[in-house]
Amino acid sequence: MKVAFSTQDKQRVDAHFGWAKNLAIYDVTPQGYSFVENFEFGGKLEEDGDEDKLAPKLEAIKDCAILYVAAIGGSAAARVVAVKIHPIKVPQPEPILDILEKLQEVLKGTPPPWLRKALQKGVESHFDEDIDQNESEAKHG
């Protein structure tokens, strides 16, 4: 599962999504995590109301299931959710590696429902039908 981090310093989640100079992408599994790519953004990122600045960011994170941010505006959050990415606000700057380690531990156990849904991103939908079929066979068989 790919996870995006909104960051100014490439070390911590410390940036508002729209203002972030960097979006760091990592791949996370129960076995570990690895750095995938960093997208850098320039220009006047702090200008509010400029929806065009979001398009390249949304494109950069399109394969991600989760987006960690320090903050995100309402319209940006709606656009992130619309492309099936789960935004998570981090209340104060937190090291990306700490978040990755916590996320990896959660994946080893029983992830909460929202995370199980996020894990389905990119998986073909007939997988759900297979589960439903197996459950009904178990109940009736």
Image: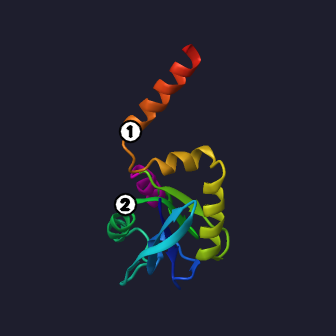
- The kind of secondary structure the magenta stretch mainly shows is helix
Residue shown at 58% from the left, 18% from the top = 139
Q: Position of residue 81 (x, y in %)?
A: 45, 52
Q: Is residue 57 left or right of residue 118?
A: left
User: How packed is label 2: few (under 14 Cα within 10 Å), some, or many (20 or more)?
Assistant: some
| Residues shaded magenta | 75-83
Q: Quadrant of the C terminus?
A: top right
Q: List the residue tagged with mark 1.
A: 125
Residue shown at 60% from the left, 55% from the top = 107
Residue shown at 54% from the left, 76% from the top = 15
Label 2 vs label 1, nearer the camera: 1
Residue shown at 47% from the left, 77% from the top = 20
Amino acid type, callout 1: Ser
Amino acid type, callout 2: Lys
* Residue 130 can be seen, yes or no: yes
Q: Is residue 48 left or right of residue 92?
A: left
| Kind of element beneath mark 1 | loop
Q: List the residue tagged with mark 2.
A: 62
